[in-house]
Image: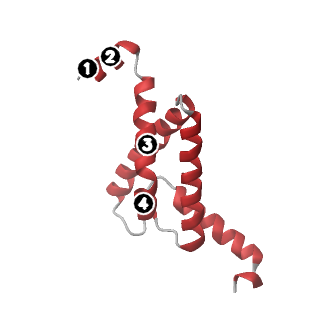
Amino acid sequence: QRCADPRGTVRLLAWKASDWLRPYPDPRFWPRPAVAGVGVYVAALYLCAGIGFVRAPRTGVSAFCLVFLAATMLFHVVLETNWRYRTANWDPVLLLYASYGAATVLPPGRRRAAAAA
């Protein structure tokens, strides 16, 4: 079926990829406050994880994690895109890098205080 409509296939895969990357749950199925709250959390997670990836000292580990994120996205986009699967696959990696990224944004004095607590 998909071979008969290559443009439709590309559009479908692009839509599924955007569905996978969107930082909030599907507003058709979730209440507006949940969509907004999760959207703020995931946007902050993406931002802090991006900072963490850029500033991480072990570039080989970062590259491995980025390949893992890309592979799991590709696998799910091709087979079945479901936002809840992204959370289980991506959030552990993103949380690790987001915590590092957030810590590097803190001023040095605050970093020592946070580490001591």
Q: Which amino acid does label 4 sit on?
A: Pro
Please identify the residue farthest to the bottom as the structure is shown. Answer: 1
Point 48% across, 39% down: residue: 49
Classed neighbour count for the residue bearing mark 1: other residues with Cα under 10 Å, few (<14), some (14–19), many (≥20): few
Question: What residue type is disc 2 on?
Answer: Arg
> Which label belongs to residue 112?
2
Q: What residue type is labelled 1?
A: Ala
Tell which circle, 4 or 2, labels the residue nearer the N-terminal end: 4
Looking at the picture, how far across and down is residue 73, in whole percent? Answer: 56, 60
* Secondary element at tag 1: helix
- Check disc 4: other Cα within 10 Å, few if <14, some if 14-19, many if 20+: many
Residue 37 visible (yes or no): yes
Single out the mark in the foreground, 2 or 3.
Answer: 2
The residue indicated by pointer 3 is: 45
Which residue, as the protein is rendered here, is positioned at the far top? Answer: 109
Q: Which of marks 2 and 3 is nearer the N terminus?
A: 3
In primary-sequence order, the first of circles 1 and 3 is 3
Q: Say which mark, if any, is on residue 116.
A: 1
Q: Can residue 26 be seen in this view?
A: no
Residue type, label 3: Leu
Camera-nearest label, 4 or 3: 3
Q: Nearer the viewer, mark 1 or mark 3?
A: 1
Mark 2 touching mark 1, by CB under 8 A?
yes
Identify the element where label 2 is drawn. helix
Q: How far apart are marks 2 and 1 (CA)?
A: 6 Å
Instruction: Please tell me in which quadrant of the rendered image residue 113 appears.
Output: top left
Front: mark 1 or 4:
1
Distance between the alpha carbons at the discs numbered 4 and 3 = 14 Å
Residue at mark 4 = 25
Looking at this rendering, what residue extends furthest in the left direction? 117
